[in-house]
Amino acid sequence: MTQQNNATLIPADTATQLRRLSHDLSNALEVILQTSYLLGTVNLDDNGRQWHQMLDQGVQQATSINRDLREFLRAHSENAAG
């Protein structure tokens, strides 16, 4: 990692709390992702398929945002190893 100005880094205690929240969010998203997968295995009418597609797109987007958040925290934290 390149040397960064300490003024731009997230304090260690704040980064730790944000990483914990991101981990908890990941766990919740995993339940939604698995449920969406299981919904995709049953026969749904056209309306149900549209709702399932919206659910799947939303959870994929939320998962991507959470991944970006974790990467940002790693790059901008005082304790980047955590």
Image: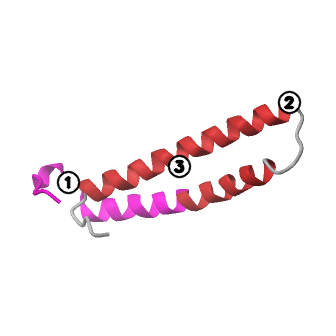
Going by the numbered disc 1, the residue's amino acid type is: Leu
Q: Nearer the viewer, residue 73 or 63?
A: 63
Between the residue at mark 1 and the residue at mark 2, the CA separation in whole angstroms equals 49 Å
Q: Is residue 81 left or right of residue 63?
A: left
- Residue occupying the point 40% across, 61% down: 19
Up-down relation of residue 79 to residue 43 (above or below):
below
Within 10 Å of the Cα at label 1, are there few (<14), some (14-19), or many (20+) other Cα atoms?
some
Among the two numbered marks 1 and 2 on one chain, the one whose residue lies closer to the N terminus: 1
Labels 1, 2: front one: 2
In percent of width and height, residue 67 lies at 44, 52
Up-down relation of residue 33 to residue 58 (above or below):
below
Q: Is residue 20 left or right of residue 40?
A: left
Q: Nearer the viewer, residue 8 or 72?
A: 72
Labels 2, 3: front one: 2
Helix, strand or loop for disc 1: loop
CB atoms at circles 3 and 1 under 8 Å apart?
Answer: no
- Residue occupying the point 47% across, 59% down: 21
In percent of width and height, residue 14 lies at 32, 59
Which of the labelled discs sits on residue 46, or is there none?
A: 2
Return the residue at label 3: 63
Magenta segment range? 1-25
Going by the numbered disc 3, the residue's amino acid type is: Thr
Among the two numbered marks 2 and 3 on one chain, the one whose residue lies closer to the N terminus: 2
Return the residue at label 1: 9
Going by the numbered disc 2, the residue's amino acid type is: Asp
Within 10 Å of the Cα at label 3, are there few (<14), some (14-19), or many (20+) other Cα atoms?
some
CB atoms at circles 2 and 3 under 8 Å apart?
Answer: no
Residue at the far bottom in the pictured view: 82
Q: Is residue 7 left or right of residue 47?
A: left
In percent of width and height, residue 46 lies at 86, 30
